[in-house]
Image (cartoon, rainbow, N blue to C red):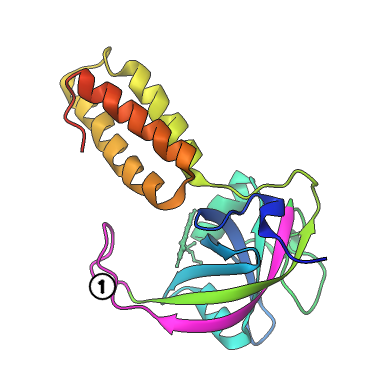
Amino acid sequence: MAIDLTDIGIEEGQKYEGIYTTMSKDGVKNAAPIGIACKGKDKLECRLFVGTQTLKNIMDTGKYVINITFDPLYFAKSTIGNLDITEFSDDEDIAILKNAEAYIICEVTSIRKMDPIKDHVTSNGEAYIISSDALKIVKNNPCAKAINRGLFALLEFLTNYTRLDLVGKDQQDYFIGRFNENNRMIKRVSDEDTIEAMEILKKSMIEKGFDVE
Ligand SMILES: Cc1cc2nc3c(=O)[nH]c(=O)nc-3n(C[C@H](O)[C@H](O)[C@H](O)COP(=O)(O)O)c2cc1C
């Protein structure tokens, strides 16, 4: 059957978050949360910063797995360090999370160095763009869907919005700052509906007299 990333909610042009699992040349399994950019029904891209074990393993082996999960502990533990070996499946030749809702086996098609990144967080981050083919999608949960963090940011801001008229000026400024930052992120990663939802909120805040970017 042809690969179709929309089967797990991954749509072209949007960005998602998953736990990438890789293996070193020596067979050591590694896990880390990394963004997923969808470039077609079976095409994926990610941006990996120099210094991550994930980039080193992918450069060495040309392979990785994207695990789709909502598990907060997987995300926290694999950001700070590695996951315990017991969290990986018993396969000896591939690193996969045992409890992933779904996973995508990816094969690298190109690795290119980016121009030094000057964005809102880094002044000279060195990074590579990894382009890949999705070779296989395995669904352990038939309803598995990749996480898009824009929706969480929208919900978080909606709760702030309902408190805007109840708090003091400093807290209002903090909420508006969070809105501006999340709106920037949502325009980059989310679907049209989430972007429109933020525009509706922006309009409402401007009508209330708030200085929104
Ligand atoms: C939700 C989330 C998304 C992330 N996306 C990326 C990314 O796209 N590229 C990247 O290089 N690091 C990203 N990171 C940071 C890495 O996960 C982090 O540097 C991690 O420690 C790398 O682990 P490793 O050295 O085992 O590869 C992300 C972190 C989180 C929490």
Q: Is residue 144 visible?
A: yes
- Count of number-bearing discs: 1
Question: What is the quadrant of residue 113 in the picture?
Answer: bottom left
Rendering coords of residue 138 (x, y %): 79, 60
Give the magenta-colored segment's residue range.
Answer: 102-125
Q: Is residue 47 above or below residue 193?
A: below
Please tell me whether mark 1 sits on a helix, a strand or a loop.
loop
- Which quadrant, please, contains the C terminus? top left
Rendering coords of residue 45 (x, y %): 52, 69
Residue found at x 18% / y 25%: 210
**Direction from residue 80 to residue 204 in the image, left or right:** left
Residue matched to label 1:
124
- Can residue 63 be found in the magenta stretch? no
- Which quadrant, please, contains the N terminus? bottom right
- Can residue 119 be found in the magenta stretch? yes
Q: Is residue 100 visible?
A: no
Question: What is the quadrant of residue 166 in the picture?
Answer: top left
**Direction from residue 36 to residue 28 in the image, left or right:** right
Q: Is residue 201 above or below residue 147?
A: above
Q: Nearer the viewer, residue 26 or 10?
A: 10
Q: Is residue 74 above or below residue 63?
A: above
Q: Is residue 135 above or below residue 119?
A: below
Q: Nearer the viewer, residue 196 or 120?
A: 196
Farthest residue to the top: give it. 166
Residue found at x 50% / y 68%: 46
Give the residue type at disc 1: Asn
Label 1 CB sits under 8 Å from any ligand 1 atom = no
Rendering coords of residue 107 (x, y %): 65, 78
Rendering coords of residue 106 (x, y %): 66, 73
**Direction from residue 101 to residue 58 in the image, left or right:** left
Residue found at x 57% / y 68%: 44
**Direction from residue 11 to residue 197 in the image, left or right:** left
